[in-house]
Amino acid sequence: MLPKREQRRYFKISEVSQIVGVEPHVLRYWEKEFKEIKPIRFSSRRLYTEEDIKTIIEIKKLLYEDGFTIAGAKRYLSRYVKRQTLLKEIKNELLDILLLLKK
């Protein structure tokens, strides 16, 4: 999570570079390699969300700390996203069941 003073909707690539600790050219490269990073394009600028930043931090951890290759990190993130989606679906179904039981 970003510090309170830094919580905003969108961040420029230079700001993300400072927050994450990688050069802007690395961010542009990762953007091409990882479909999970989806900055909004406004004019000639990239604007990243807090969710994008969290994903970038995870990618940096996978590559720099955990020793994953780009291909390995892609597979890991793909599985992680699928698991998260499945968990959200299960949670929603359980909430629906709970509502039915309350009736």
Image (tube, rainbow, N blue to C red):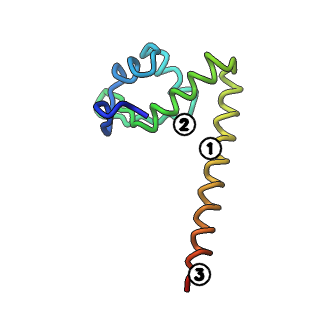
> Disc 3 vs disc 2: Cβ atoms closer than 8 Å?
no
In terms of sequence position, does the residue under pointer 3 or pointer 2 come before the other? 2
- Circle 2 Cα neighbour tier, 10 Å, few/some/many (<14 / 14–19 / ≥20): some
Picture quadrant where residue 36 is located: top right
Real-space Cα separation, disc 1 to disc 3, in angstroms: 29 Å
Real-space Cα separation, disc 2 to disc 1, in angstroms: 9 Å
> Disc 2 vs disc 1: Cβ atoms closer than 8 Å?
yes
Foreground residue among 26 and 63 = 63
Q: What residue type is labelled 3?
A: Leu
Residue drawn at x 62%, y 48% as measured from the top left: 84
Residue drawn at x 65%, y 61% as measured from the top left: 90
Residue identifier under label 2:
36
Question: Quick one: quadrant of the N terminus?
Answer: top left
Real-space Cα separation, disc 3 to disc 2, in angstroms: 35 Å
Could you tell me how many numbered marks the image carries?
3
Residue identifier under label 3:
100
In terms of sequence position, does the residue under pointer 2 or pointer 1 come before the other? 2
- Circle 1 Cα neighbour tier, 10 Å, few/some/many (<14 / 14–19 / ≥20): few
Residue 70 location, x and y as percent? 65, 22
Q: Which amino acid does label 1 sit on?
A: Val
Picture quadrant where residue 76 is located: top right
Q: What residue type is labelled 2?
A: Glu
Horizontally, residue 38 falls left or right of residue 99, namely left
Mark 3: which secondary structure? helix
- Circle 3 Cα neighbour tier, 10 Å, few/some/many (<14 / 14–19 / ≥20): few
Horizontally, residue 35 falls left or right of residue 68, namely left
Residue drawn at x 47%, y 21% as measured from the top left: 27
Residue identifier under label 1:
81
Q: Indicate whether 82 appears above or below 63.
A: below
Residue 79 location, x and y as percent? 69, 41
